[in-house]
Amino acid sequence: MAVKLSLVLAVVVGVASALAAALLAVLCKCCWVWWRYRRLHRRRSPSQETHIINQKGKWPGGITYQTYENGSVADYDSISSGEEPYIVETPGDFGKLQFLLEYNKDEDVLIIGLVQAKGIICKTNIQTAYVHPVIQLCKGEKTLGEREIEKQKMTFEPQWNEEVLFSLDGNPIDTISFSIRLIELDSYSNSHVIGQVELSLSEADFGEPQPRWYDIAGEQKLPSHEYVGELLLSLNYFPTTQRLTIVVLKARNLKIDTKSGLWGPTVKVFLMLNKTRLGRKRTAMQKKTVNPVYNEAFTFKVTSETLSKVTFKVLVVNKHSQGSDQMVGHVFLGQQVTGSGFAHWNHMLASLRRPIAMWHPLLPGM
């Protein structure tokens, strides 16, 4: 009888322990789910719209920059999962092209090994565009040969790794030149020249065993307006959270007319859709300097459907205690604008979730 009683007691204790453990596990799971829900859906106060810069680093070339904290919790999750949170330097207005040159004297053949490109700026829509190089061999104004490399989907850093051979047919090598043009095909099969590299074989270094980087040239129009300064901005878009972060980093060589009394430049950021203002942010005023450093980040909610339609207007204003404020200059960012604002926007779209920084010349006035 005592054996049966102890056996029943052991079974009861075991079942009770199992139920208690299961209940504890369910409670822990509920607490974790509640904590995650609160973390992802907590409301942000207005003071959190501007985030403090907390780490320092350097760009290639010795340019100082500072990394910043993103505004949304989902952005932190993306960074912790392996995304690179640092600002990167853009490789010029038109990008760079890497290729290798070889000349076979016995066969009288020029070999061009096209490797890759970086910093390519899409002129239409990066989701639907294609890119392909066209290599042309010339003697003066006469075309000796032309080769097209197979097109591929538009990317920020396309790679080809292909060799192209040209027979010189006895022409002296110092009279030959060649060009590599990058052609963009939009969704309607219309061609757009992104840029090109031109090189004379008399200036080529055939003894270099490794591929070299060359700057891609384009028909860059010099600004016809007067120089009033430059502004360094960073753009970053997270498609999962549909948040666009614009960071006002610094300005340089601002043309300030009034420097008496209390004065200092500040930067205003406007989010616009069809000339209608949807949002407005402003940095703190940096007193009595023409080279202010701000390091302030602002986050805007922008859906993927309206990303191609919105425009940012960034205005630099000199506030002073004597008289009205001076409008130093402004910058437009978006797919609906031209110049550096268009190039910067496409760099951002080509490198989603990664902050991209670029200097912009200021347009005078409003």
Image: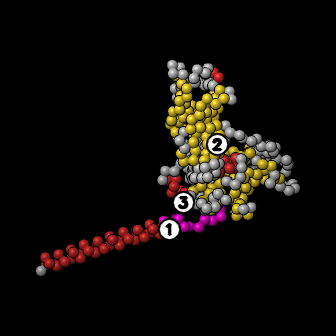
Q: Residue 179 or 73: which is nearer the viewer? A: 179
- CA gap between label 1 and label 3 equals 17 Å
Q: Is residue 1 left or right of residue 221?
A: left
Please report whichever mark, 1 or 3, sits nearer to the chain's N-terminal start.
1
**Which residue is nearer to you in this view: 313 or 220?**
220
Q: Which residues are magenta?
A: 36-50
Report the residue at 65% width, 42% height from top: 193
| SS assignment at label 1 | helix
Mark 1 — residue? 37
Instruction: Identify whether 84 is placed above or below 276.
Output: above
Local crowd size for mark 1, using a 10 Å CA cut-off: few (<14), some (14–19), many (≥20): few
Q: Find out whether residue 44 is within the magenta segment.
A: yes
Q: CA distance from mark 1 to mark 2?
A: 46 Å
Q: Quadrant of the C terminus?
A: bottom right
255 displayed left or right of 3: right
Q: Quadrant of residue 51?
A: bottom right
| Position of residue 107 in the picture relative to residue 229 (left or right) | left
Q: Secondary structure at mark 2?
A: strand
Q: Identity of the amino acid at label 3?
A: Thr
Q: So how many labels did they put on this image?
A: 3
Q: Which residue is mark 3?
A: 240
Residue 91 in sight in this render: no
Q: Which residue is mark 2?
A: 194
Q: Would residue 45 be counted in the magenta stretch?
A: yes
Residues marked 1 and 3 touching at CB (< 8 Å): no
Q: Residues within 10 Å of mark 3 (few under 14, many from 20)?
A: few
Q: Residue at x 64, y 30 (%)?
A: 143
